[in-house]
Image: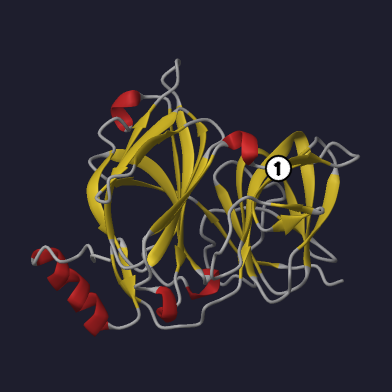
C-alpha cells in the first residue's frame, strides 16, 4: 500500500453567492483539473439568518451534478419540472442537471438560527451532458452509518466502504463521498483507489494528515513554492487537503478528534467550458446554452 502525500493545502475562502448568502469556498471557478471530476465545493455555515435567508433564487444548471448535504437547518427547493421538497439534518440531494434545469434553494436555519451544509459540483462527461435531469433525494436515515472498533464513524453517502454501499447510484464518475469522524488521538488508514483524485475537507476538530515519513498540516494558500514552505502540524476548521497519488490516506486526530469529508472520483479528462452553473466541453456548446436561456428553450421537452 502507498500512502498519498499532500499535494496542496488551502483554507476555504469567504465569498458570497445567490442573493447574498455568505459562505466559504474550498475550491471552484478556476483551474480545477487536479480535482477532476469535481468542480466546486462550498461550505455554507452561518448562525446569523441575515447572512443566508435570501438564499439562491431561480438559476440554471446544465452539464453538471450538484450534491447538497445538510448538517443543520433546512433547505427548501423547487425546480422548473415541478419538483419541490425540503432537505433537513443529515439529508442529501444529488441532482443531475443534465440537459438543463432551473431551480431555487432557500436555506432556513434550525431553532437556534444555525444553518450548515455543503454543496459539491461534479462534472458530467460529454456523453451525458445533455441527459435527462433527475434527482436522488436521500433522507438521512437511509445513509449507512458505520462505526469501527476504535470509534471511527463513517457516513457513506456514495460509493462502497467497509462493506457498505451508499444510497446514491448511477453516477458517471463512480465517486465516493464519505463523512468521517475520528476520535481524539486515534490514527486511521483509509483506502482510496489509486485511479481516483481525492481530497479531504476538515470541518470539525483538528488533526494531521501524513505521508509515509513526515507530518502535513494546513496553511492558508502557501507563500512561495510548495516544496519549501513549512507546514503547521495541525489541520483545522474549513481546511481542504488535496492528495497526490497513492492508494490510501492516513489521518491522526487531535485532542478534540477530527471530522472531515473524504471525496474521490475517477477523472473525466475532458475540456471544460465554464460559465457559472453551466459547464460544457466547448465554447460553442456554452454559447448554445446561453442562447437557449435567452430564447426560453433551455428546458428540453422530452
Furthest residue in direction top, as rendered: 111
Viewer-side residue, 184 vs 144: 144
Instruction: Please say if 87 is above or below 234.
Output: above
Viewer-side residue, 202 vs 84: 84
Question: In which quadrant of the rendered image does the C terminus lie?
Answer: bottom left
- Total numbered labels: 1
Query: Can residue 24 be spotted in the picture?
Result: yes
In the image, 57: left or right of 201?
A: left
- Residue 66: which quarter of the image? bottom left
**Rendered residue at 37%/24% (across/down):** 48
**Rendered residue at 36%/69% (across/down):** 63
In the image, 79: left or right of 216?
A: left
In the image, 44: left or right of 139?
A: left
Q: Position of residue 41 (x, y in %)?
A: 47, 54
**Rendered residue at 25%/57% (across/down):** 60
Question: In which quadrant of the rendered image does the N terminus lie?
Answer: bottom right
Instruction: Please say if 118 is above or below 283.
Output: above
Q: Secondary structure at mark 1?
A: loop
Viewer-side residue, 14 vs 106: 106
Furthest residue in direction left, as rendered: 295
Mark 1 burial class by Cα count in 10 Å: few <14, some 14-19, many 20+: some
- Residue 64: which quarter of the image? bottom left
Furthest residue in direction right, as rendered: 149
Q: Position of residue 103 (x, y in %)?
A: 28, 48
In the image, 179: left or right of 107?
A: right
Q: Position of residue 165 (x, y in %)?
A: 71, 53
Q: Position of residue 208 (x, y in %)?
A: 74, 50
- In this figure, which residue is indicated by the disc labeled 1? 144
- Residue 288: which quarter of the image? bottom left
- What colouring method underlies this structural image? secondary structure
Query: Can residue 26 be spotted in the picture?
Result: no
**Rendered residue at 25%/39% (across/down):** 20
Amino acid at each position: 500500500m502507498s500512502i498519498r502525500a499532500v499535494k496542496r493545502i488551502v483554507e476555504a475562502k469567504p465569498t458570497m453567492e445567490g442573493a447574498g448568502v455568505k459562505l466559504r469556498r474550498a475550491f471552484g471557478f478556476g483551474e480545477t483539473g487536479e480535482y477532476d471530476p469535481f468542480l466546486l465545493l462550498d461550505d455554507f455555515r452561518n448562525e446569523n439568518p441575515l447572512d443566508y435567508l435570501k438564499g439562491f433564487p431561480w438559476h440554471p444548471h446544465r452539464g453538471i451534478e450538484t450534491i447538497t448535504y445538510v448538517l443543520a437547518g433546512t433547505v427548501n427547493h423547487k425546480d422548473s419540472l415541478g419538483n419541490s421538497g425540503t432537505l433537513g439534518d443529515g439529508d442529501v440531494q444529488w441532482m443531475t442537471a443534465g440537459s438543463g434545469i432551473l431551480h431555487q434553494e432557500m436555506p432556513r436555519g434550525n431553532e437556534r438560527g444555525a444553518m450548515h451544509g455543503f454543496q459539491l459540483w461534479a462534472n458530467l462527461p460529454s456523453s451525458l451532458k445533455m441527459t435527462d435531469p433527475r434527482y436522488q433525494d436521500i433522507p438521512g436515515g437511509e445513509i449507512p452509518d458505520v462505526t469501527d472498533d476504535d470509534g471511527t464513524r463513517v457516513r457513506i453517502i456514495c460509493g462502497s466502504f467497509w462493506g457498505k454501499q451508499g444510497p446514491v447510484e448511477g453516477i458517471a464518475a463512480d465517486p465516493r463521498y464519505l463523512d468521517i469522524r475520528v476520535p481524539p488521538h486515534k490514527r486511521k488508514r483509509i483506502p482510496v483507489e489509486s485511479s481516483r483524485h481525492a481530497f479531504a475537507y476538515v470541518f470539525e476538530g483538528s488533526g494531521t494528515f501524513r505521508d509515509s515519513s513526515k507530518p502535513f498540516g494546513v496553511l492558508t494558500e502557501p507563500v512561495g513554492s510548495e516544496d519549501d514552505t513549512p507546514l503547521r502540524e495541525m489541520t483545522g476548521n474549513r481546511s481542504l487537503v488535496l492528495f497526490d497519488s497513492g492508494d490510501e490516506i492516513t489521518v491522526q486526530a487531535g485532542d478534540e478528534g477530527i471530522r472531515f469529508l473524504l471525496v474521490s472520483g475517477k477523472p473525466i479528462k475532458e475540456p471544460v467550458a465554464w460559465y457559472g452553473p453551466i459547464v460544457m466541453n466547448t465554447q460553442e456548446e456554452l454559447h448554445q446554452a446561453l442562447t437557449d436561456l435567452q430564447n426560453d428553450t433551455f428546458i428540453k421537452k422530452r
